[in-house]
Amino acid sequence: MEPPFVAVTTTSAIQSGKFIRVVVEERPYIIANVDGQFYAVEDTCSHEDYPLSYGCLDGDRITCSLHGSRFSLKTGAPLDEPAETPIQTFKLAVADGWVWLDPTHPAAQS
Ligand code: FES
């Protein structure tokens, strides 16, 4: 993979239904595996800047452990109050057993 993609983990390091926290250039991200599909989102809740990595996955959603808002890993959209603002999603690529993150570009919203 060419820059700006950065290898952040191996695919085998994250079991389906799990996520890990990675830091790239001092910024934390969540890399999640949902049934073999990998997603990257910022590790910061849009409600009160709390780490989402303290929360848990529920399918393709991540739940903030502070006040319970859930966010779509696909779009970053908040699904419950009190959060009202999407979190940022990022492009990922999988190649040669590695997960590559493009920290420069939000993923396409769908
Ligand atoms: S800090 Fe995440 S819902 Fe309040």
Image (spheres, rainbow, N blue to C red):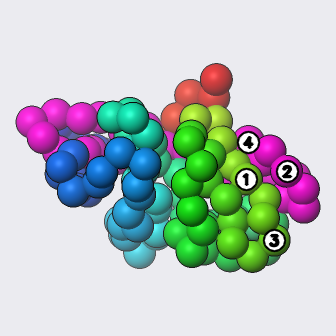
Residue nearest the observer in this picture, 56 or 42: 56
Residue at mark 2: 80
Percent across and percent down for residue 48 are 79, 74
Is 78 magenta? The answer is yes
The alpha-carbon separation of the residues under discs 4 and 3 comes to 16 Å
Label for residue 70?
1
Residue toward you, 33 or 30: 33
Neighbours of disc 3 within 10 Å: few (<14), some (14-19), many (20+)? some
The amino acid type, in three-letter code, at marker 2 is Asp
Task: In the displayed orientation, state which residue is furthest to the left.
Answer: 96
Picture quarter with the N terminus: top left
The label nearer to you, 4 versus 3, is 3
Q: Give the residue type that dot 1 points to.
A: Arg
Rendered image quadrant of residue 47: bottom right
Marks 3 and 2, Cα distance to the nearest angstrom? 10 Å
Task: Of the two numbered discs 3 and 2 on the same chain, state the one appearing first in sequence.
Answer: 3
Q: Amino acid at mark 4?
A: Ala
Is residue 40 positioned above or below 65 on the image?
A: above
Q: Earlier in the sequence, mark 1 or mark 4?
A: 1
Q: Which residue is mark 4?
A: 77
**Label disc, if present, on residue 67 of the rendered structure:** 3
Which residue sits at x=24%, y=35%? 94
Labels 3 & 1 near each other (Cβ < 8 A): no
Task: Provide the secondary structure element on which disc 1 rests.
Answer: strand
Quarter of the picture holding the C terminus:
top right
Label 3 lies in ligand 1 vicinity (Cβ under 8 Å) = yes
Query: Residue 51 at what x, y percent from top left?
Result: 60, 74
Q: In which quadrant of the rendered view does residue 65 lie?
A: bottom right
Visible in this render: residue 6?
no
Label 3 secondary element: loop
x and y percent of residue 62 in the render?
A: 61, 54
Q: Are marks 2 and 1 in contact (CB under 8 Å)?
A: yes
